[in-house]
Structure formats: structure tokens, C-alpha cells
């Protein structure tokens, strides 16, 4: 097991390097100059040259690349152009918000999605199956930003216009009066702000998971050992949840890794719509302000999270499926 | 005598022969489509003449109109003659494939919807009730039309500049549908070629290419897209290119997997024994046999790409604002949610409809093309 973990981690490292290189290349090849934001009227060409030299923009691409890479490895992400704060501090401030949003959504989406998929597979071709299939396909085909806006329309705009008892807030992590509330009310305030963003992310994600789990469970249910389990006289519940689910969930572990990119893409939109101060919103804002250091670090962070997620999924896969750990592969 | 009259009339009116044959669905569809197009052609005659001077759009619309009318008529006559002689054969070359596909009603619905969407997109200059940029409140003083709710005059309402939302959705469909189709075509061609080469050659070339694939796939696609579109000067070609550039690894993986197993099969060995070149084996023997999963991923990919394009426009990174685009319309509507729900709602529904159609079609194709799945369908 240890050698398996070691092998997998070793293959992830060049991947991370590649991600960093692609990010760097895209930004360096782009037209326009990062020093442009320091332009002032009446600035002499000599001053401009000095700024460019101070920022290190004069050096050849390869030199800049290695300098950037080494400072990255040391954990020095430079200073944000827009706010003159260290990039790492801005990202660290945003990270917990993204983490809260993404982890709650991921948990709910996989919980709901797995449950839906299993129910559908067990009752294949029933009315419930087609109803759930239709619903999940509908949400699967929906842009998350539009779903978020529709949720705002119903649960916030209309809710306040029609005088519903609960009106959900549409922006930020906490309300403006957060500091004045008691501890329990503060928690309530946070949860209320979390509801709509989490719901928008969860619905779209759960739809994909349900589609996947249904197919995977259908394959498992057809296998001989399920028939054996039934023939042994086990209760249907035990057959499905103990014997079936254990194997049906193996591909879902991979899905967990694979859905990280779409989850992170989703958080970009959702954070943007709900003014949620997370990494996604930071990234969009920085791109619009041409704040290169933040964009570089943020993109690398997202790429790194995906690589780490896939690595984790691979390792988990090794835990749940011993054949992989021991290098037994068919084909 | 009466039936002879009817069959003569049937030669003139598409769908009648099929209706006489009691094939209600096919006959009804043909007849409705024919009638709708003919009505369009006659009632919008001045518009057609006018749009011809407006450049390529008008000509494309007119050509589409004539082609569809002609195609409808010749299909109806040929089909009707055949059924009259009682030797109807199932349509299409891949009989098994088509019959599996046709049994999946939702997939057929998806196919028809996709077809209808592209037809509508091509006919937009004739169909749209208004010019998408026409602002009656500012150009004709009709101030009541600012954010007017849906009514008979403006079925889907008007936006904050009093422009007709239905017309803008129709014109916006051209961006979404063409970007989706073009980006996926490019990425599928690229991905299939690279995948076939990697799978066929194997060895270190395969290893290196697959690491690149892993790298591109490790990216959250949206972030790479945003970076590409935001830092280079945004244009529709850049958007198509960027979407294609971030999509190809999916196809590459699928094709490589297929080719890996295909190259061990006897027919490849036979081709090699006959001394065929690698490129001939790849293009003539391996790629055609690996097409089934490619078509499925491509169809599902178009839906995904439409969502992404709309997302880029929504963030203000897509096509430039005067051009109507579904994503931009949703973004605009977001600011007016409390006064005019229809501005954001309807363009979003259009996105859902288009993506849903492609997903239904893709699911149906997968069921029909993948033997493992089709066994499942039959139970």
C-alpha cells in the first residue's frame, strides 16, 4: 500500500509542474503588459523602463519562468497589483469561504445523488425512475448561474414581495448586522446566507451524480453475486445496500475526483452571482482588473486542487478495490 | 375516384399521402411544417425581399426556406409512392442502429428539437417579429414598452431598453448554436486524431501525450477559458478556439482507449500484414471503428459547450454586448429581477431547452451505439 501511495504521489508532481507551466505560458503570451496599470499621464519613457526593469519584465521568458517557479515553490506568490497586499494573504482570506461553500455542496450533492441513483436503479423503468430521470436531466442541462438567479427570484425577490415568512439573503457570507447578534443567531445568520448558493451548486451537481450512480448500480445489480445474495434469502435492503452499493460505489469514488473541476467552475459562477467572497470571485475580479499575480496563484491553486482531488480519488480507489493496489489490471 | 383525387392532391401537399396511410405522426409533422413554412413565406414576403439586401443572413434564410420546402416535398412524394406500392423499407442505412434509436422516444424528441432549433436559427431573419436592436421607447417614443411584461405584442416581454425579448432570443440562438457546433467539431477532430495516433503508436509517444491530456484535464476548464478569453482580445473566433482547446482531451482519451483494443484485433493485423501504411490503418481502419463513442461524447459536449459559452457571456467575457447572446441577456436580467422577471428567465429557458435537446440526443445515441447499454435497454 505504501509503495502504491508513493507511486501515485510521484506521478502527481510533474502534473503540478505542468499546470504551473501552462498557467505561466498563457499569461506571458497574452498581449498587453502588466506594467500598464502603473501608467500615469506625462510619465517619461525612462521611468516606464525602470518600472519594467524593477518588475523583472525585461528579462527573457525563460529567466522569468524559473524565477517565478522558484518563488512559487518557496511559497512566495508575490504582491497583488490591485491591493498591494501579499497574494497569499488575499487567497487565504478567501479560501475558507470557498471551502465552506464547496464542501457542504459536495456532501449534499453526493448524498442526494447516490440516494437518487440507487432508488432509480432498484426500481428501473418504474414511474419513479422516469420521473427522477427527467428531473435530473433537467437540472443537469441547466447553467448553474441561471438556476441561482431563478432561486433568488423565487426565494428572495418574490418571497419578500409576497410576504413569505422566510426570505433568504442574496449576497455575502453574513448579514450587515452580524456583529450585533448573539452566538446562536450568528450561526443562524451564516446558515441562512449559505442556503441559496449551496442549493444552486448542489442541484446541478447532484443531477450528474444521480445519472452516474444509476448506470453503475444497474451494472452491479445484474451480476451473479447479487443473485446469490438474493438466493441466500437476504433481505432486499441488505442485498442492495450491503452487497450492491459496496461495488456500485467504486466508480463513484472516481467521480468524486472527476467532479472537482466542475465543482470549482460552479463555485466561480455561484460566488460571482451571490457576491460570495471566495477564491472564485477573487479570481474573476482579478482577471477583470488584470491583477496577474493573483490570477497566477489562484489558477494554480484550482489546478492543484484538481490534481490533489484526483490523487485522493486514486488512493481511495486503491483502498476500496484491492486489485488496483496490487497492480492487477485487466487489459 | 375520390381516392385517386386524394393521391393526386397528395403529390402536391406533403404529408397528405402519409395521413391517408394512417401514419398520423409523420404526416402531421410534414403537413404542419409545410404549412408553417408556406405561411411564413407568403406573409413575410416583403420581409424576405427586404432582408435580401441586408447581406448574407437574408440569403441564408431564403435558401434554408427553399431547401426545406423542396426536401419536404420530395421526401413526401418518394415516401408516398413507396407506401402506395406497399414495399416500404425502413429508412436509413444502419437499420439496426436506427431502430434501436427510434424506440427511445425521448431521444427522437431530442433529435427533432435539435433540428428545429437549427432551422429556427437559420430562419431567424424571417421569423423574428422585431429587429433585435430596435428600441421603440427611444426610437418611436413608446415609453410604455420599457420592461413591458409579456403580452400579445411582445410575447416574452421587453427589456430595459424596450427591445423585444423573443427577437433577441431568436438572434441569440445563432451565437450559442454555432459556437457549440463549431467548437465541438474542432475539438473532436483534433482529439480523435491525437487519440488515434497515441493509441496506435503506443510507447513513449503515447505516455507523453497522455501526460499532456492529464494536465489539460487537471484544469478547471472554466478558469483556463476565462484566462484565455480575458487576456487575449476577445472575439467570437477566440471563444470558439478556447472552447475547442479545452475540450479535446476528453475525445483523445475515449479514442485512445478504443484504438488500444482495436489495434489488437484481427482486421488490424490483416491490414498490417498487407503492408498498409500507419496513416492508412489509422484513417481507414481504426478511426471509423472508434467513431461511435466519439459521436456520443461530441453530442453531449455540445450541450456542455453551450452552457460554458453562455457562462462566459454572463461574466461579460463573451461576445460584445450589442450582439444578442443568451448569457448576456441573463446577466442583464439579473439587475432587473425585482421589476421584470422575464428578462432573465426566458433566455435561460432557451439555454436549458437547447442543452436538454443535445443531452437527450446524446443519451439516445449512447444507448443505440453502445452494445452493452442497448442490452440493458431491452432488459
Image (tube, coloured by chain):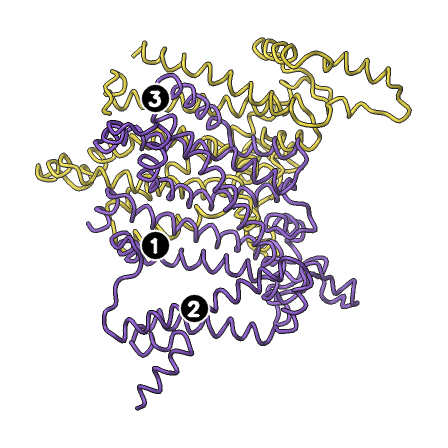
Q: Check the residue under mark 2 and report the chain it is in.
A: B
Q: Nearer the viewer, mark 2 or mark 1?
A: 2
* Secondary structure type for disc 3: loop
* Secondary structure type for disc 1: helix
Q: Which color has been applied to chain B in this rendered view?
A: purple
Q: Is residue A193 visible?
A: yes
Q: Is residue B25 above or below residue A287?
A: below
Q: Quadrant of the C terminus of chain A?
A: top left
Q: Could you say where residue B95 lies in the image, as x and y percent from the top left?
A: 26, 55
Residues at marks 3 and 1, CA–CA distance in whole angstroms: 45 Å
Q: Nearer the viewer, mark 3 or mark 1?
A: 3
- The residue sitting at 29% across, 32% down in the picture is A249
Q: Which residue is mark 2?
A: B72
Q: Earlier in the sequence, mark 3 or mark 2?
A: 2
Q: Quadrant of the N terminus of chain A?
A: top left
Q: Could you say where residue B219 lies in the image, as x and y percent from the top left?
A: 50, 27
- Looking at the rendered structure, the number of numbered marks drawn on it comes to 3
Q: Could you say where residue A69 lies in the image, as x and y percent from the top left?
A: 59, 12
Q: Nearer the viewer, residue A89 or A159?
A: A89
Q: Which residue is mark 3?
A: B202
Neighbourhood count class around disc 3 (C-alpha, 10 Å): few under 14, some 14–19, many 20 upward: some
Q: Is residue A228 above or below residue B159?
A: above
Q: Could you say where residue A316 lies in the image, as x and y percent from the top left?
A: 33, 22
Q: Nearer the viewer, residue B255 or A195?
A: B255
Residue A181: image quadrant is top right
Q: Which chain is yellow?
A: A
Q: Check the residue under mark 1 and report the chain it is in.
A: A
Question: Which mark is on residue A131?
Answer: 1
- The residue sitting at 37% across, 73% down in the picture is B77
State left or right for residue B307 relative to residue B232: left
Residues at marks 3 and 2, CA–CA distance in whole angstroms: 49 Å
Amino acid at each position: 500500500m505504501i509503495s502504491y501511495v508513493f507511486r501515485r504521489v510521484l506521478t502527481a508532481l510533474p502534473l503540478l509542474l505542468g499546470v504551473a507551466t501552462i498557467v505561466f505560458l498563457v499569461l506571458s503570451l497574452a498581449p498587453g503588459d502588466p506594467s500598464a496599470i502603473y501608467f500615469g499621464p506625462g510619465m517619461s519613457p525612462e521611468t516606464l523602463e525602470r518600472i519594467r526593469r524593477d518588475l523583472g519584465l525585461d528579462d527573457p521568458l525563460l529567466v522569468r519562468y524559473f524565477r517565478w517557479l522558484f518563488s512559487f515553490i518557496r511559497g512566495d506568490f508575490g504582491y497583488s497589483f490591485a491591493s498591494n497586499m501579499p497574494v497569499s494573504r488575499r487567497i487565504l482570506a478567501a479560501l475558507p469561504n470557498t471551502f465552506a461553500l464547496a464542501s457542504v455542496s459536495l456532501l449534499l450533492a453526493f448524498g442526494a445523488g447516490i440516494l437518487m441513483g440507487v432508488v432509480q436503479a432498484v426500481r428501473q423503468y418504474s414511474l419513479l425512475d422516469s420521473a427522477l430521470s427527467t428531473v435530473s436531466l433537467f437540472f443537469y442541462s441547466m447553467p448553474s448561474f441561471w438556476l441561482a438567479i431563478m432561486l433568488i427570484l423565487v426565494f428572495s425577490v418574490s418571497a419578500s414581495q409576497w410576504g413569505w415568512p422566510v426570505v433568504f439573503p442574496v449576497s455575502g457570507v453574513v448579514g450587515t448586522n452580524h456583529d450585533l447578534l448573539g452566538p446562536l443567531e450568528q450561526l443562524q445568520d451564516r446558515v441562512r446566507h449559505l442556503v441559496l448558493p449551496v442549493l444552486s451548486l448542489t442541484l446541478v451537481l447532484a443531477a450528474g451524480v444521480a445519472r452516474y450512480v444509476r448506470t453503475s448500480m444497474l451494472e452491479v445489480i445484474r451480476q451473479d453475486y447479487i443473485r446469490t445474495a438474493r438466493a441466500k434469502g437476504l433481505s432486499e435492503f441488505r442485498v442492495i445496500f450491503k452487497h450492491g452499493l459496496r461495488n456500485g460505489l467504486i466508480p463513484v469514488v472516481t467521480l468524486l475526483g472527476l467532479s472537482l473541476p466542475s465543482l470549482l467552475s460552479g463555485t466561480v459562477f455561484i460566488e460571482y452571482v451571490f457576491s460570495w467572497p471566495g477564491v472564485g470571485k477573487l479570481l474573476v475580479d482579478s482577471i477583470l482588473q488584470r491583477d496577474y499575480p493573483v490570477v497566477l496563484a489562484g489558477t494554480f491553486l484550482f489546478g492543484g486542487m484538481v490534481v490533489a482531488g484526483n490523487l485522493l480519488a486514486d488512493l481511495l480507489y486503491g483502498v476500496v478495490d484491492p486489485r488496483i493496489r496490487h497492480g492487477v489490471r485487466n487489459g | 375516384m375520390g381516392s385517386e383525387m386524394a393521391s393526386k392532391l397528395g403529390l402536391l401537399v406533403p404529408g397528405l399521402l402519409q395521413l391517408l396511410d394512417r401514419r398520423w405522426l409523420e404526416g402531421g409533422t410534414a403537413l404542419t411544417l409545410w404549412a408553417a413554412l408556406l405561411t411564413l413565406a407568403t406573409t413575410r414576403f416583403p420581409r424576405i425581399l427586404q432582408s435580401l439586401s441586408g447581406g448574407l443572413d437574408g440569403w441564408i434564410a431564403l435558401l434554408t426556406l427553399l431547401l426545406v420546402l423542396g426536401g419536404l416535398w420530395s421526401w413526401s412524394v418518394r415516401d408516398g409512392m413507396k407506401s402506395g406500392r406497399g414495399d416500404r423499407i425502413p429508412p436509413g442505412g444502419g437499420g439496426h442502429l436506427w431502430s434501436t434509436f427510434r424506440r427511445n422516444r425521448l431521444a427522437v424528441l431530442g433529435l427533432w428539437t435539435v433540428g428545429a432549433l437549427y432551422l429556427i436559427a437559420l430562419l431567424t431573419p424571417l421569423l423574428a417579429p422585431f429587429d433585435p436592436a430596435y428600441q421603440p421607447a427611444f426610437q418611436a417614443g413608446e415609453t410604455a414598452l420599457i420592461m413591458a411584461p409579456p403580452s400579445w405584442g411582445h410575447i416574452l416581454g421587453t427589456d430595459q431598453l424596450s427591445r423585444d425579448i423573443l427577437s433577441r432570443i431568436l438572434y441569440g440562438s445563432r451565437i450559442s448554436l454555432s459556437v457549440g457546433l463549431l467548437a465541438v467539431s474542432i475539438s473532436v477532430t483534433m482529439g480523435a486524431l491525437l487519440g488515434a495516433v497515441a493509441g496506435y503508436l503506443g510507447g513513449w509517444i503515447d505516455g507523453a501525450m497522455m501526460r499532456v491530456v492529464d494536465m489539460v484535464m487537471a484544469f478547471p476548464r472554466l478558469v483556463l477559458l476565462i484566462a484565455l478569453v480575458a487576456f487575449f482580445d476577445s472575439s467570437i473566433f477566440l471563444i470558439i478556439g478556447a472552447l475547442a482547446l479545452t475540450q479535446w482531451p476528453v475525445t483523445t482519451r475515449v479514442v485512445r482507449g478504443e484504438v488500444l483494443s482495436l489495434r489488437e484485433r484481427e482486421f488490424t493485423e490483416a491490414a498490417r500484414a498487407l503492408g498498409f501504411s500507419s496513416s492508412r490503418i489509422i484513417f481507414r481502419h481504426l478511426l471509423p471503428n472508434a467513431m461511435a463513442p466519439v459521436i456520443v461524447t461530441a453530442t453531449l459536449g455540445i450541450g456542455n459547450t453551450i452552457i460554458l459559452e453562455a457562462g462566459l457571456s454572463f461574466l461579460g467575457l463573451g461576445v460584445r454586448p450589442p450582439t444578442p447572446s443568451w448569457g448576456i441577456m441573463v446577466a442583464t436580467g439579473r439587475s432587473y429581477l425585482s421589476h421584470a422577471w422575464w428578462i432573465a428567465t426566458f433566455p435561460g429557458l432557451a439555454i436549458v431547452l437547447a442543452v436538454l435537446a443535445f443531452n437527450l440526443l446524446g443519451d439516445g445515441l449512447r444507448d443505440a451505439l453502445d452494445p452493452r447499454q442497448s442490452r440493458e435497454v431491452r432488459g
